[in-house]
Image: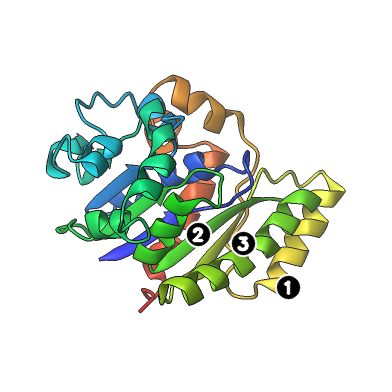
């Protein structure tokens, strides 16, 4: 089972869009996928119109079992959603004696999937540290601009520090350039810089595409909403790339 977190402490880089469409695309390739939303904004819940009685915070606090939080929304695709109650999760974790490992232990109870994909909030708090302690792979979506490149470089240092602190060997196995506009000089320059600094890890870019913005309003992944769009083609290439990768140890 591959455990992948979609993470970048910078907001607005396409984390949720990537998490949703990567999970949906992989599930369409006859792999069983669990998509977990750890962002208090609950955008996965909103984007896919998930109707869940319980969410990840309920499981963390013991108000619900983890299995009761899982909702099936399509063939091979299950979701654990979040709501604004997750804003209390950081404080809740800090109060626990096992705060550094609590979420990791909870997630380690999950079985029966080919992929666990976790959409993380844009922060460096204890919840994301717990996720890095659990996952073996980090996918970093990064906007193709100066600030996006700067955040990407900082993420590599953050992961190194968390690995040292938690004794884990989580690693960046994919860098996903997003919001790419080939007409824009800075986008092209940043893409080349990403390819040079992260040789072998950079995926093909995800182009700016209006259909990617429209799909959530319609409660669908890009594959269900506009399967012939550039967005679907780009995420389709990413899915094939991920499936061809050797899993991190």
User: Which residue shows up at 73% across the image and 57% down it?
Assistant: 149
User: Which residue shows up at 59% across the image and 75% down it?
Assistant: 200
Q: Residues within 10 Å of mark 3 (few under 14, many from 20)?
A: many
| Residue linked to disc 1 | 196
User: Which residue shows up at 51% across the image and 53% down it?
Assistant: 7
- For the residue pair 19 and 104, the one nearer the viewer reads as 104
* Residue 101 occupies quadrant: bottom left
| Residue linked to disc 3 | 155
- For the residue pair 205 and 145, the one nearer the viewer reads as 145
Where residue 121 sits: x, y (%)? Answer: 50, 43
Relative to 246, 51 lies left or right: left
Instruction: Identify the disc placed on residue 139.
Output: 2
Instruction: Identify the disc placed on residue 178.
Output: none
- Do labels 1 and 2 touch, CB within 8 Å? no
Identify the element where label 3 is drawn: helix
> How far is mark 1 from mark 2, CA to CA?
17 Å
């Amino acid at each position: 089972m591959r455990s992948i977190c979609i993470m970048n402490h910078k907001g607005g880089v396409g984390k949720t869009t990537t998490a949703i469409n990567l999970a949906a695309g992989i599930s369409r390739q006859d792999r069983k996928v669990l998509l977990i939303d750890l962002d208090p904004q609950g955008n996965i819940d909103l984007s896919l119109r998930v109707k869940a009685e319980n969410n990840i915070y309920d499981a963390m606090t013991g108000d619900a079992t983890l299995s009761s939080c899982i909702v099936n929304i399509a063939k091979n695709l299950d979701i654990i959603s979040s709501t604004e109650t997750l804003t209390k999760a950081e404080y809740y974790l800090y109060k626990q004696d096992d705060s550094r490992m609590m979420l990791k232990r909870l997630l380690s109870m999950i079985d029966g999937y080919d992929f666990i994909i976790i959409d993380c909030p844009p922060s460096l708090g204890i919840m994301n540290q717990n996720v890095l302690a659990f996952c073996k792979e980090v996918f970093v979506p990064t906007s193709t601009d100066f600030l996006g490149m700067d955040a990407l470089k900082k993420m590599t240092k953050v992961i190194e520090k968390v690995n040292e602190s938690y004794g884990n060997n989580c690693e960046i196995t994919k860098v996903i350039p997003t919001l790419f506009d080939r007409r824009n000089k800075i986008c092209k320059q940043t893409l080349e810089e990403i390819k040079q600094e992260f040789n072998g890890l950079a995926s093909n870019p995800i182009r700016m595409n209006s259909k990617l913005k429209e799909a959530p309003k319609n409660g669908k992944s890009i594959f269900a909403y506009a399967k012939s769009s550039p967005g679907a083609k780009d995420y389709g290439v990413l899915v094939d790339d991920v499936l061809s990768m050797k899993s991190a140890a």
